[in-house]
Image (cartoon, grey):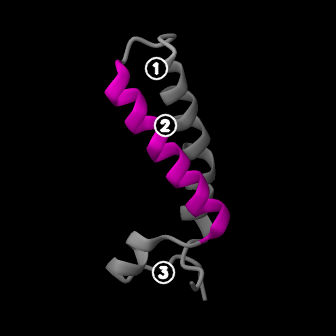
């Protein structure tokens, strides 16, 4: 797949992804009182953001015709 994530979009994903994942893990081990379902959703979104930021490809961006890579 062609890269379609770059610039501020990539930076935001690389910052928000691990933060969301940590919040999700903290909720799942009951350090934060968010509940299991919100914790699982936060963890999943965090992993997706991190992976799309690292790989610089996003399927949703492709479907919507969005390209922030600057090419």
Residue drawn at (61%, 61%) of the image: 53
Closer to us: 1 or 53: 1
Q: Main secondary structure of the magenta part?
A: helix
User: Most extreme residue toward the right, as rendered?
Assistant: 54
- Report how many numbered discs are placed on residues in the image: 3
Q: What's the CA distance linking mark 2 and mark 1?
A: 9 Å
- Residue 25 drawn in magenta: no
Name the residue carrying label 2: 43
Q: Is residue 32 left or right of residue 15?
A: left
User: Most extreme residue toward the bottom, as rendered?
Assistant: 71
Residue drawn at (37%, 83%) of the image: 65
Name the residue carrying label 3: 67
Q: In this view, does 68 lie above or below 52?
A: below
x, y percent for residue 16? 55, 44
Name the residue carrying label 1: 27
Closer to us: 15 or 31: 31
Q: Is residue 35 above or below residue 24?
A: above
Residue drawn at (52%, 76%) of the image: 68
Badge nearest the viewer, 1 or 3 = 1
Q: What's the CA distance linking mark 1 and mark 3?
A: 33 Å
Magenta residues span: 35-56
> Does dot 3 land on a helix, a strand or a loop?
loop
x, y percent for residue 13? 56, 54
Contact between marks 2 and 1 (CB within 8 A): the answer is yes
């Amino acid at each position: 797949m062609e890269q379609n994530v770059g610039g501020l979009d990539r930076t935001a994903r690389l910052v928000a992804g691990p933060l969301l994942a940590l919040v999700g893990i903290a909720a799942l081990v009951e350090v934060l009182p968010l509940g299991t379902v919100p914790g699982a959703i936060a963890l999943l979104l965090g992993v997706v953001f991190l992976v799309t930021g690292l790989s610089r490809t996003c399927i949703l961006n492709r479907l919507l015709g969005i390209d922030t890579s600057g090419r």
